Each structure stands twice: as structure tokens, then as C-alpha cells.
Image: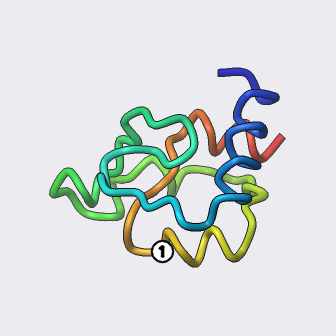
């Protein structure tokens, strides 16, 4: 997905706060595997997210709704930090 496509999907999710992420292994933006170490049974210290230096621009309300439910994938994270 291009950054533009990620932003379009993200905006769609923002406008539809009722959408629920049922699968913690799935990125709520692109719906691909998020490769979260924690959901794979590993420690947070081994997760890709701890190696990221940028801060993704994610709507705080959407982020709060996802807290503890699903992580975005590395590809979407990188596109949202550009």
C-alpha cells in the first residue's frame, strides 16, 4: 500500500469508530498481519515496534479504541511517520 492508500483507509476507520478489530494479529489499517511479538507469545522487548524512532500520527481516539486489542503493522507505522 502507498502512503496515500494507508491514509485513505485510516480516514475511513476514523469516520467509522464502530468498526471493531476482531483479530489482534491483524493491522487495523491494511488488514494484513501486524507481526506483533506479544501476540505471537514473545516478549515486548523482541517486538519490531521498539526499534522505531519516529512517532506515527494516529488519531488519539482511534488509538484509545485499539489499545490492548490490535497493533498496526510496521509498514503502516512507517508510512504514518513520514
* In the image, farthest residue toward the top: 1
- Circle 1 Cα neighbour tier, 10 Å, few/some/many (<14 / 14–19 / ≥20): few
Query: Tell me, what colour scheme is on the image?
Result: rainbow
58 over 65 or under it: above or below:
above
Residue 36 placement, left or right of 13: left
Q: Which residue is mark 1?
A: 67
Q: Quadrant of residue 32?
A: top left
Q: Position of residue 12 (x, y in %)?
A: 70, 47
The structure residue drawn at horizontal position 51% and vertical position 59%, both measured from the top left corner, is 19
69 over 35 or under it: above or below:
below
* Front residue (pair 49, 34): 34
Residue 32 placement, left or right of 51: left
Q: Position of residue 16 (x, y in %)?
A: 64, 59
* In the image, farthest residue toward the left: 41
Residue 19 placement, left or right of 34: right
Q: Position of residue 70 (x, y in %)?
A: 41, 60
Amino acid at each position: 500500500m502507498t502512503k496515500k492508500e494507508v491514509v485513505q483507509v485510516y480516514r475511513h476507520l476514523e469516520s467509522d469508530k464502530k468498526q471493531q478489530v476482531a483479530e489482534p494479529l491483524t493491522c487495523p489499517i491494511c488488514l494484513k498481519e501486524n507481526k506483533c511479538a506479544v501476540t505471537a507469545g514473545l516478549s515486548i522487548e523482541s517486538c519490531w515496534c521498539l526499534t522505531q524512532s519516529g512517532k506515527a500520527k494516529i488519531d488519539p481516539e482511534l488509538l484509545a479504541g485499539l489499545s490492548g486489542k490490535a497493533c498496526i503493522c510496521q509498514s503502516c507505522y512507517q508510512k504514518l511517520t513520514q
